[in-house]
Amino acid sequence: MSFFLIVGTVKAEEFAKNAKSAVLMEYSTGKILYEKNKDEKLAPASMTKIMTMLILMEKIDNKEISLDSLVNISKSASSMGGSQMFLDEGSEVKVSELIKGLSIASANDAAVAIAEFLGGSVDNFVNMMNEKARELKLENTSFKNPHGLDQEGHYSSAKDMAIMARELIKHDTILKFTSTYEDYFNKSDGSKTWLVNTNKLVRFYNGVDGLKTGYTNTAKYCLTATAKKNNIRFITVLMGEESSDLRSKETTELLNYAFNNYKLNTILSSDNIIKEEYVEKSNVDKVGLVTINDVNEVISNNKELDKYNYNVKVNKLVAPIKKGEKVGTVEIKDKDGLIVREEDITVNNDLKKINYIELLLKSFKLLLSGK
């Protein structure tokens, strides 16, 4: 289902006047609240590093590597031009330091070092980037490098960048880095490189804690930003601005509009039991069914909350089952009976499989109870 929604008295042309393309997305639902040329293929510049960081954070969260893993810096990485953190050839640098370089200073040398570390070569890592793009169903994205310097066939779109950003933010450790305005890269020889965030909104807009700027002669000034206030988070993407001041100004306007006009409503909390169901081969007769994640909707501030009905479709439950494992779905219907959402459901507790003696006793008790 596609969403193109501008509500209230604000006109679409009042936003992102100078950008070639733009998107405003609510994070928890992925709902697009505003768009301008959202599918246009454009050079993303250093916003490319969002994908580089996404692959890196997945490896960290999957415990394939850690923040303390050491990366050997090659001649190729150390000789990268453009924005950099001045890595020394032959040195070993912690992954955490490279993330600082990527997220704060937009360091191209850090991007190449990470690509070589994770992929074995830059070309292999670029293949990983494009495979991830296919997995996320990014229809207007093609990567040729991990840093974003202009290259033929290297492009993305505002919508695709917003989707990438949403995936990256799910690894919330990254926000500790992207929200840092300034820090130092401590080199092995005792010297320091001062890192200053290229995203000035981190310092000057309350709630902004990321995400990534970009600039090349072809891409012009770009910014994917995210901000959270209270219980709602938004993602904005602007591509093709004429100056860094304009990208900050028009991002601020989009965020102000979002926070002033929208709120989040939780339709179903993952803590709320929707229905109880019988479980075979378990020490309990019934288990509560819950959604795997909170089910939210983003609505305008002046809109009354809708009432919903639920239709649960559950597989036959046989222990063992772990909480978080999909066991069925729940259809969420509006007041007219139309299905507006379908969400995965799970059990609210881990269920262990009982042994043969316990199973006989349970069957005996059920027989006596007449169930």
Image (cartoon, rainbow, N blue to C red):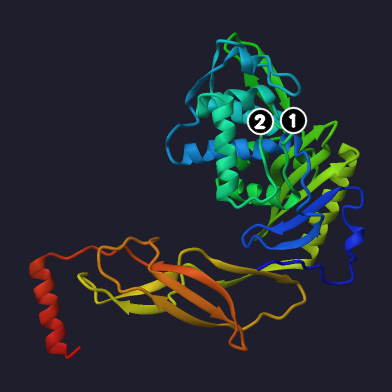
| Other residues around mark 2 within 10 Å, as few (<14) / some (14–19) / many (≥20) | many
What residue is rendered at 26% in x and 69% in y?
Answer: 318
Q: Hey, which quadrant is residue 299 in on the image?
A: bottom right
Sequence-first tag of 2 and 1:
2
**Helix, strand or loop for disc 1:** loop
Q: Position of residue 327 (x, y in %)?
A: 38, 68
What residue is rendered at 42% in x and 37% in y?
Answer: 63
User: Which three-letter amino acid code belongs to the residue tagged 2?
Assistant: Asn
Seen in the picture, residue 248 relative to 71 is either above or below; the reply is: below
User: Which three-letter amino acid code belongs to the residue tagged 1?
Assistant: Gln
Numbered badge on residue 151: 1
359 vs 19, left or right, is left
Label 2 – label 1 distance at C-alpha: 8 Å
**Helix, strand or loop for disc 2:** loop
Residue furthest to the front: 153
What residue is rendered at 54% in x and 78% in y?
Answer: 332
Q: Where is residue 12 in the image (x, y as percent from the top left)?
A: 88, 63
Seen in the picture, residue 260 relative to 119 is either above or below; the reply is: below
Dots 2, 1 in contact, CB < 8 A: yes
29 vs 182, left or right, is left
Q: Where is residue 13 in the image (x, y as percent from the top left)?
A: 91, 60
Determine which residue is flagged by label 2. 145
